[in-house]
Amino acid sequence: MNKNAATFIAKSTIKAADLEHRRKINYNISKYNAAVPNGKKQFANIESTRELAKNIKWEAVEHLDKYLLEFEKKISERGVKVFWAENDKQTLEIIGKICTEKNCKTVVKSKSMVTEEIHLNPYLEKLGIESVETDLGEYIQQLDNEPPYHIVTPAMHKSKEDVARVFTEHLGVPNGLTPEELTQVARNTLREKFANAEVGITGANFILADIGAVAVTENEGNARLSCSMPKTHIVIAGIEKVLPSVHDLHLFWPLLSTFGTGQKVTVYNTIITGAKLENEVDGPAEMYVILLDNGRTNLLVNPTVREALNCIKCGACLNVCPVYKNIGGHSYGTTYSGPIGKVITPYMKGMEDYKHLSYASSLCGACTEVCPVHINIHELLIDNRREAVLEGYSTIAERVAWKAWKKASLSRKLMNSGNAKLKNWVVNKMVKGWSKQRGDIQFSKKTFNEMWQDFRTDL
Ligand code: SF4
């Protein structure tokens, strides 16, 4: 077993037995579950909306080359510099170079999973640059020195008492402050950072090809401040974020809000088309966009798993997943957790190191059922398992066991031979892992042929 798989199993085992963790998660997810039906009411026909969204994303991903070039051309015409980065290293170098040129001491950052993916904060720290998370959930996680727990709700595993403790420990405020008071503390601290930061970094919820723009959606206004107050704005966007047209937003903004948080529409929705123009008073003097691959093209070249690039990162599949709800977001050891994380990570970071994630699923299909863009998540998990075997990443023991199983199950003679006691002993010795968390395998006392014979006699 590789190191990542062993760590995953160890962490999951501990978390699954942590009842306090389960209580907090169930409480926070129950609030989400209560809100979503309200959000859905805005759609006359939610099923056809999802189908339409899937088709638009399909069009965008199938013609990614065309739409990305169109985006680059349009936004470059307004003076925005666009970079294409193959991996995290290239992205960090580009950001490092820009920050050094600007003599940057402080970066304000809005919530962005792609910056987690490239480990931006530790990199900036090494350059002596303070990188401040400005989304409240991310800020709490940064103070507590933890990565985001969930792709939409970074501090979902924390209660309000946990947050108060974090603020007391790291900001020295009195313990037991109310959520409103804690928010005020964060607001006062962050305002100062916004005012002094030289560079603002945001992700992109969508990049719009036809008008050459970046669409950012958020609830706190911090992304809007991050991209408008500092003199330099850098956007990092995964290449799959593209939508063909600005007109697609009327569908994707409410869809993302409803499936992400249960809102009809998120509080702040911003379309950024470039830096400040001559006659404008607000906005950055310069804007850069980095289009990041980092393994996404490994998904793109595979016609089966390509549909995973349709994901709009709403987090709904995490919220319904029985595995996620038990083991939590940190056990995965990956930036993207939950069902969609299990599908994409082996392609983005290596099948050999992350194939184990595809097996951490009950295959109940709840993720597929809830996905707003109809990604066949649970079937892709099965496909990942197949892909891992085809790439030669199954163990010898696994191969021998399946060969023996195939031989036995294709032979009526072998199926009928031996008594149940002997078969139980052999099989339970062979597949010890199976019975670690379950009862032993028990063969029926009678073979199928014997039962069929009895059935015919009874007729
Ligand atoms: S796979 Fe579907 S449900 Fe999961 S985060 Fe992506 S869009 Fe949302």
Image (cartoon, rainbow, N blue to C red):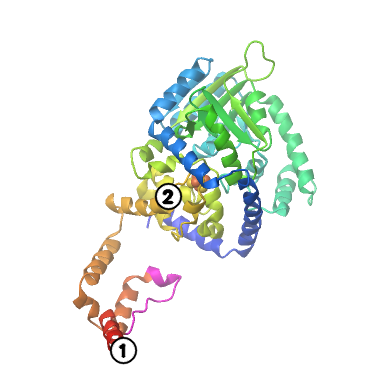
Residue 240 in view in this figure: yes
Query: Which residue is under mark 2?
Result: 376
Closer-to-camera residue (308/122): 308
Q: Is residue 294 above or below residue 315?
A: above
Instruction: For mark 2, give the secondary structure.
Output: loop
In the visual, does 365 lie left or right of 277? left
Q: Amino acid at mark 1?
A: Asp
The numbered mark, 1 or 2, whose residue comes first in the sequence reads: 2
Q: Is residue 2 magenta?
A: no
Write the start and end of the magenta stretch as one range. Answer: 433-445
Q: Main secondary structure of the magenta part?
A: loop
Q: Residue at x 65, y 50 (%)?
A: 35
Q: Is residue 441 magenta?
A: yes
In percent of width and height, residue 300 lies at 37, 38
User: Quadrant where the N terminus lies?
Assistant: bottom left
In percent of width and height, residue 113 lies at 54, 39
Q: Residue at x 51, y 47 (%)?
A: 47
In percent of width and height, residue 103 lies at 60, 20
In the visual, does 429 lie left or right of 137? left
Name of the residue lying farthest toward the bottom:
458
Q: Is residue 328 above or below residue 201?
A: below
Closer-to-camera residue (448/187): 448
- Name the disc covering residue 458, or none: 1
Closer-to-camera residue (296/13): 296
